[in-house]
Image (spheres, rainbow, N blue to C red):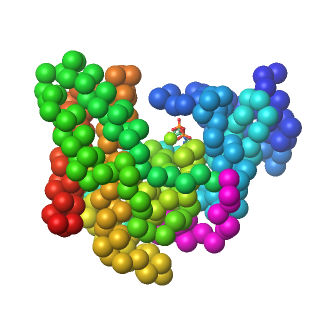
Amino acid sequence: MTHIEKRLTEKNMKLLKMEVIQGAHAGEIYRLEVLTENGENTSLIYKEFASERNNEVEIFSMLSSCIEPFSKVITLWASHPQAILIDDLGSPLKNEFSLLSAQHKKALLEKVLKRFAALHYSKVNIREGLKVHTLNSVWLEWAKNQLKRLCYECSWAESNWSKTIEQTYTKLNVTNYKQKCPQVITHGDPHLENIFYQDSQVWFIDWEWAAKSSPLRDITILCQDIYDPNLIQFISTSYYKKLKNLAIPFEDYLQDFNYFYIDHTTMMLAWEIEKFFLGYTSEGQIQEIVEFKINEIIKVTNEQIKWST
Ligand SMILES: Nc1ncnc2c1ncn2[C@@H]1O[C@H](COP(=O)(O)OP(=O)(O)O)[C@@H](O)[C@H]1O
Ligand SMILES: [Mg+2]
């Protein structure tokens, strides 16, 4: 009996089938078909953490009451090998989002934003142990290296991109930015592969980077995965209305949006290039992704400079 079968047996479940979910994941992720003690077949996800990427275990222990309404976690194993068992939520929004009509995209985004508002309004005591997320130079340095690698490999990659991003960080002093909005609990990585829609509800997985930060932290990670300036504008406007009870001055909201959007677009630019080098993205796709993200960084930088002078 494998350790996974043993763990399921302890929960009165019998393993029927098991398949690996392929992808650039930090640990091992399996889709399991199990027989429950009620005699029902059900599909579950078992995520086993790599030893240096196990922060999610601590986050779940620390924030369980806060996370529970947003995630269908069944069980967590804190002993080696650390793992979680979650309901199978189907396929992430990433797979279908681009195929939806503009109207359906907005309707779905409204539901996602409603869930973010509920999370960001969470009244749970923000525990001392929970880290504070602030902007720094880590993503800038990673993106500069990745763009350099891309220039060696692809003739369409422009050698000045790295400098352009560096200038943004310098001009706006991104690495020393202090958030303007109140500190809330944030998920920390809600791109469309970590968001699901099931049973008329939006769900979030992958809480590894949860931390105290600006509510704009989550919104801008979502935005960098949307690739449509109208929808990005829609998210920004719509989310401000959802936060009205926090009484945030609009200038503060906008400034957090711009700074966090720049840093997260830079982060995901680097990660998207990594996925290209790992073979998960075609050259045509990565060209579109990189060009869109660089243009967004330039656009928002210019808006922020214009607006603050
Ligand atoms: N509960 C779930 N239901 C359905 N698919 C899931 C679930 N959990 C994980 N997955 C699949 O596995 C992928 C990676 O899981 P995730 O927890 O985000 O790991 P990582 O930290 O490596 O990103 C997700 O994008 C999704 O495709
Ligand atoms: Mg993930």
Examine the rendered structure and indicate whether residue 278 appears above or below residue 260: above
Examine the rendered structure and indicate whether residue 178 appears above or below residue 84: below
User: Whole-percent x and y of residue 259?
Assistant: 32, 56
One can see residue 199 in this view? no
What is the quadrant of the C terminus in the image?
bottom left
Examine the rendered structure and indicate whether residue 251 appears above or below residue 30: below
One can see residue 49 in this view? yes
Q: What is the total number of numbered labels drawn onto the structure image?
A: 0
Looking at the image, residue 93 sits to the left or right of residue 39; the answer is left
Residue 72 among magenta residues: no
Q: Which residue range is magenta in the image? A: 111-129
Residue toward you, 116 or 2: 116
User: Whole-percent x and y of residue 258?
Assistant: 30, 59
Rendered residue at 79%/34% (across/down): 79
Looking at the image, residue 39 sits to the left or right of residue 309; the answer is right
Give the farthest residue toward the top.
152
What is the quadrant of the N terminus in the image?
top right
Residue 47, quarter of picture = top right
Rendered residue at 74%/29% (across/down): 81
User: Whole-percent x and y of residue 136?
Assistant: 41, 45
